Image (tube, rainbow, N blue to C red):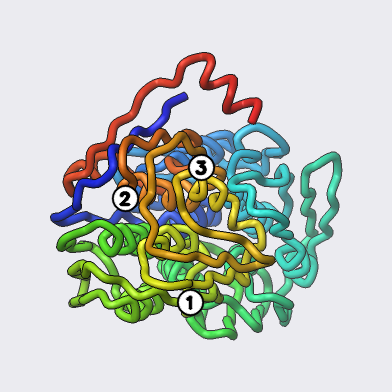
């Protein structure tokens, strides 16, 4: 196991290149199962989640070639191999294998997925969709069993707006007989990205980006080439970093429209931001004004940026309130920020942050992916050296983090943890 050491207090400046979207990649790779010939996905982020999914496709008989930022998937020899344990347990997004394998083989056995521990994230809406399409779904010994003689189109109303359920139902429905209508569908850019791939494969999907998606089932899907959209959450993380300790930072390979809610809040804090087609330039300001944020489904403020933004608010004047309406367990990093000197308290679904406060380097642990990003930003701001463990979470979603930070002028490096440190982490 490794830890990341961050020597804080060095202002950042320069250009950072944004990678392909993690939240697209983890759905696009399972979608390749549905094709009858080779699918090539490029602009892939080099992160651990991508490697895990490549391994899972190989487990069910696929031929996968992963090189640099490109994955070539040959699905011809894939079979409905049960995946009740192993790698599937390490990755929340492995639930997309349910929809893809059900759509392709009319059956699947998938272990209940893992990933970041953000409290209950039920898959009841996914199951509701699968059952509406004609599948029988049972939970047996910690795995989900899906079986269908045939899949038929249906009208499905999602009780809650869910990105995962919207994509999973799309995957299952593209080869179903007849028309499927998903109402109260999520509108995230990653859903549009997945639908673009499926349509390139021969699917007939309309309405993505709105709350009603219509899918006319087809009998066959062929291979294609697809390039992933830029990662709006990685982009947002570096934008927040630029606001916290940047002098002038250019965020390159970005779709500014995808981060409009964040840009609006940064401007409200007093930052000067310039945008063009695929770049955002952030000029820092010395005195930042505190703001309140509330996370909402897209196009609202993303829950995935709530934790990094909270770190930024420790440097703003006055009291700010951060409310997360999506996940109620997304404040596990607050104790770590307090350890570094932040003045924050949690009340229910809200964190109340008073600033500005000087942060001090400390030994902290990332409990999940975006908590890790929040603590990296805190380390960059802090006086002294911060030791961050739990890097396996950070590596799930941020490609080449250290080099990107080093190129901006940060002082960061990795070290192997001692046996004693590993034991302390395991017992905590």
Left or right, 351 with respect to 348, comes to: left
Q: Residue 363 carries which label?
A: none
Q: How crowded is mark 2: few (under 14 residues within 10 Å), some or many (20 or more)?
A: many
- Identify the image quadrant of the C terminus: top right
Q: Residues under labels 2 and 3: Cα distance? A: 17 Å
N-terminal of the pair, mark 2 or mark 3, is: 3
N-terminal of the pair, mark 3 or mark 1, is: 1
In this view, the mark in front (2 or 3): 2
Quick check: marks 1 and 2 in contact, CB under 8 Å? no
Which residue was labeled with disc 2?
A: 381
Left or right, 376 with respect to 184, comes to: left
Which residue was labeled with disc 3?
A: 366
**Foreground residue among 380 and 204:** 380
Q: What element does badge 3 sit on?
A: loop
Which residue was labeled with disc 1?
A: 292
Q: Residues under labels 1 and 2: Cα distance? A: 21 Å
For the point 40% across and 42% down, the residue is 47
N-terminal of the pair, mark 1 or mark 2, is: 1
Q: Which residue lies furthest to the top in this view?
A: 419
In percent of width and height, residue 174 lies at: 59, 68
In percent of width and height, residue 49 lies at: 48, 43
For the point 57% across and 81% down, the residue is 213
In this view, the mark in front (3 or 1): 1
Q: How crowded is mark 1: few (under 14 residues within 10 Å), some or many (20 or more)?
A: some
Look at the image and tell me whether residue 25 can be seen.
yes
Quadrant of residue 295 in the image?
bottom right
**Foreground residue among 359 and 336:** 359
Q: What element does badge 2 sit on?
A: helix
């Amino acid at each position: 196991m490794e830890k990341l050491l961050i020597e804080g207090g060095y202002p950042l400046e320069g250009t950072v290149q944004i990678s392909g979207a993690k939240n697209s990649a983890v759905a696009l790779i399972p979608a390749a199962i549905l094709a009858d010939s080779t699918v090539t996905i490029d602009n892939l982020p080099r992160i651990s989640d991508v490697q895990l999914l490549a391994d899972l496709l190989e487990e069910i008989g696929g031929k996968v070639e992963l090189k640099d930022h490109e994955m070539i998937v040959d699905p011809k020899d894939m079979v409905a191999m049960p995946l009740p344990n192993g790698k599937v347990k390490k990755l929340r997004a492995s639930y997309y294998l349910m929809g893809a394998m059900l759509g392709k083989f009319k059956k699947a056995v998938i272990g209940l997925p893992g990933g970041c521990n953000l409290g209950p994230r039920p898959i009841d809406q996914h199951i509701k969709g699968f059952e509406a399409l004609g599948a029988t779904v049972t939970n047996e010994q910690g795995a989900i069993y899906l079986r269908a003689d045939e899949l038929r189109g249906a009208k499905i109303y999602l009780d809650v707006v869910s990105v995962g359920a919207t994509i999973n139902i799309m995957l299952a429905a593209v080869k179903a007989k007849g028309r499927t209508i998903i109402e109260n569908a999520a509108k995230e850019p990653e859903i549009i990205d997945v639908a673009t791939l499926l349509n390139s494969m021969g699917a007939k999907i309309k309405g993505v980006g709105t709350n009603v998606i219509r899918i006319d089932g087809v009998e066959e899907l062929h291979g294609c080439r697809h390039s992933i959209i830029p990662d709006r959450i990685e982009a947002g993380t570096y934008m927040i970093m630029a606001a916290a300790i940047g002098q002038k930072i250019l965020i390159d390979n970005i779709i500014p429209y995808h981060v409009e809610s964040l840009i609006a809040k940064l401007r409200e804090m007093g930052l000067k931001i310039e945008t063009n087609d695929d770049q955002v330039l952030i000029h820092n300001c010395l005195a930042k004004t505190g703001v309140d944020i509330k996370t909402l489904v897209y196009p609202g403020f993303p829950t995935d940026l709530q934790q990094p933004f909270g770190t930024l608010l420790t440097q703003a004047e006055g009291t700010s309130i951060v409310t997360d309406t999506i996940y109620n367990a997304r404040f596990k990093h607050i104790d770590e920020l307090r350890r570094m000197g932040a003045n924050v308290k949690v009340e229910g679904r809200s964190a109340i942050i008073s600033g500005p406060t000087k942060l001090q380097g400390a030994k902290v642990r990332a409990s999940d992916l975006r908590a890790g990003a929040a603590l990296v930003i805190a380390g960059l701001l802090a006086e002294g050296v911060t030791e961050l463990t739990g890097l396996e979470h950070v590596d799930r979603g941020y490609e080449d983090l250290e080099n990107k930070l080093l190129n901006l002028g940060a002082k960061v490096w990795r070290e192997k943890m001692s046996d004693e440190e590993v034991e302390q982490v395991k017992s905590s």
